[in-house]
């Protein structure tokens, strides 16, 4: 058995609980046909770009899977499994053991088993690329396209926490150093996203369009509106903030712009007909996920506007994070 | 539009010809249910590991897709599409234009459209990770498991050329420098695999077990045998070699070991009942792909043996390439 095979057998075979994974001993996996469409999403995370070199390996594993699960939830689908590409500089047991253990825990937690993968050597940064699969009744995936003028714009959870957590890790939000609980919460939001799987059915049942907020609320809403051929007017004061983010905004450590365009939120952004909002909110409440109406879809091609408490349109220099 | 979005729109949207790709404007793609099982395979290539930094970008694109297509062919399946993760240091038009163009050509040639992907920045080596999908009637994927004692062991094409091509690129096969045609053929076999899609149906119709030869014939056969719970006796002289490889073997530039364990062949290795070999060979001939019987599956747990022209078992120090 080569080093690569024994690495796979040791760390990853225990995660391959689906019969279609063939215990990771074949060249391919099978997603059985069950009359569903298969939803496919892929997201990679790179050391020094999407996570920091000294982030704990268990949080890196969870982030790699959860950023993909977040997409599946926002599309209104149930997870069916994932494949993992892992580019490593070396096989370091002290890193791989907690990485694989946490990945297995999350795979079980979210019922998304490992189906296959590839482990390659790299002289460069660690990189974890995951392609995740969901199942949905034919034609029922919720797309970015579909928002209609008059729809409510709704977002889950709170916005901006992860971007502030990254600022803290980079040493640029010193005002928080004195409040350990707030600091830990924000760093946790950066390191370990909470994919809103519990909202998937409510999204599927009620949303006209949806996506997850990964690159910044302002930019992601602009993408959803562009795909739907609409615009939106957002009441900036309605955007849900954590107490920690609100405090940082109040004392000037954080700007509203960094919150609205910061990225890494992994919340669900969706649009709903007015008469569906109550049922959606009730379903979200049952699922234990906070949701907030933040504005309205309007006609036209304009980039969505964010309106401040004085009724003025805010000028956002940057809408979202971009790699290039 | 961010740099990442315009990069995707400019280079990759033209490749997204399948309606399930939504023109790359959504967070996920759809593989429509058609009553087939979906076969999933994933393989990544890393600069400096699987390809060389100065390899032409069009060959890198083709290799990235074809190493995955080779898996689909060996599993007896027809391509349905792929997702691409591209980790780039910079957005260099002179590199991306031929890369995307060649990827689009191969996607069309092999009827395997781009469904989605992720483009990320990296400070390290280029990396291309592809997850490819095939369709097959339920339960009909050909696995590594399934070989039976008495089956023939069959391989397509020729073995060892790509490993010799890499030796040439690394300047370690000087004897070939004088024969430009042979050198170009071997280097071409390293840079641009020929996935044996034309054999997929014959594999599906006749093979008891199959895989592609990517890490070296000896090691890959050992994996197939282990998955099937059998062994094999291989007549080393029957292993099909190109004229160029045969000449290098004769003059001592290449060793039989480097040919049998060299990797990057991307040929199909399969096992067939004796009474199916003639029909398989006829189907391969119609498809224009050479196939050769190289030995027999035997009972037992032993690592497959390679027998030389004098009837002696060869001692192979290394069975295959391993990253770790």
Image (tube, coloured by chain):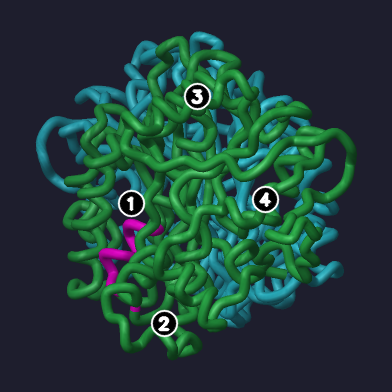
Chain colours: A green, B cyan
Other residues around mark 3 within 10 Å, as few (<14) / some (14–19) / many (≥20): few
Which residue is tagged 1?
B218
What is the number of callouts on the image? 4
Q: Could you tell me which chain the residue with mark 4 belongs to?
A: A
* Residue A235 tag number: 4
Other residues around mark 4 within 10 Å, as few (<14) / some (14–19) / many (≥20): some
Q: Position of residue B215 (x, y in %)?
A: 41, 55
Other residues around mark 2 within 10 Å, as few (<14) / some (14–19) / many (≥20): some
Other residues around mark 1 within 10 Å, as few (<14) / some (14–19) / many (≥20): many
Q: Picture quarter containing residue A317?
A: bottom right
Determine contact: label 2, label 3, CB under 8 Å: no
Helix, strand or loop at mark 4: strand
In the rendered structure, the answer to whether residue A211 lies left or right of residue B252 reads: right
Asked whether the residues under marks 2 and 1 belong to the same chain, the reply is: no
In the rendered structure, the answer to whether residue B230 lies left or right of residue B206 reads: left
Asked whether the residues under marks 3 and 1 belong to the same chain, the reply is: no
Tell me which residue sits at (13%, 45%) in the image.
B302
Whether residue A59 is in magenta: the answer is yes
Per the model, the C-alpha gap separating discs 1 and 4 is 65 Å
Which residue is tagged 2?
A169
* Between A324 and A126, the one nearer to me in the picture: A324
Q: Could you tell me which chain the residue with mark 2 belongs to?
A: A
């Amino acid at each position: 058995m080569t080093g690569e095979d024994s690495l796979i057998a040791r760390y990853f075979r225990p995660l391959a609980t689906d019969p279609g994974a063939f215990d990771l001993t074949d060249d391919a996996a099978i997603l059985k046909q069950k009359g569903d469409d298969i939803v496919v999403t892929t997201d990679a995370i790179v050391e020094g770009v999407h996570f920091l070199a000294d982030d704990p390996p268990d949080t890196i594993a969870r982030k790699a899977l959860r950023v993909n699960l977040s997409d599946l939830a926002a599309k209104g689908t149930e997870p069916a499994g994932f494949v993992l590409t892992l580019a490593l500089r070396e096989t370091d047991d002290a890193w791989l053991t907690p990485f694989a253990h946490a990945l297995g825990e999350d795979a079980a937690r979210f019922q998304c088993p490992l189906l296959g993968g590839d482990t390659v050597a790299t002289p460069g940064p660690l990189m974890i690329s995951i392609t995740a699969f969901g199942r949905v009744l034919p034609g029922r995936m919720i797309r970015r396209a579909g928002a209609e003028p008059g729809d409510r714009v709704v977002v889950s959870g709170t916005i901006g926490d992860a971007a502030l957590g990254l600022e803290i890790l980079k040493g640029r939000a010193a005002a928080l150093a004195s409040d350990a609980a707030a600091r830990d919460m924000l760093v946790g939001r950066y390191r370990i996203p909470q994919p809103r799987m519990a909202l998937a059915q409510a999204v599927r049942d009620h949303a006209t369009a949806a996506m997850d907020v990964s690159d910044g609320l302002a930019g992601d809403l602009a993408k959803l509106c562009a795909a739907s051929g609409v615009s939106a007017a957002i009441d900036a004061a309605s955007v849900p903030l954590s107490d920690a983010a609100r405090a940082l905004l109040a004392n000037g450590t954080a700007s509203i712009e960094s919150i609205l365009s910061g990225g890494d939120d992994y919340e669900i952004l969706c649009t709903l007909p007015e008469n569906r909002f109550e049922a959606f909110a009730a379903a979200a409440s049952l699922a234990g996920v906070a949701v907030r109406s933040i504005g309205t879809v309007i006609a036209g091609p304009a980039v969505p506007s964010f309106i401040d408490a004085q009724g003025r349109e805010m000028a956002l220099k940057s809408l979202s994070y971009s790699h290039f």
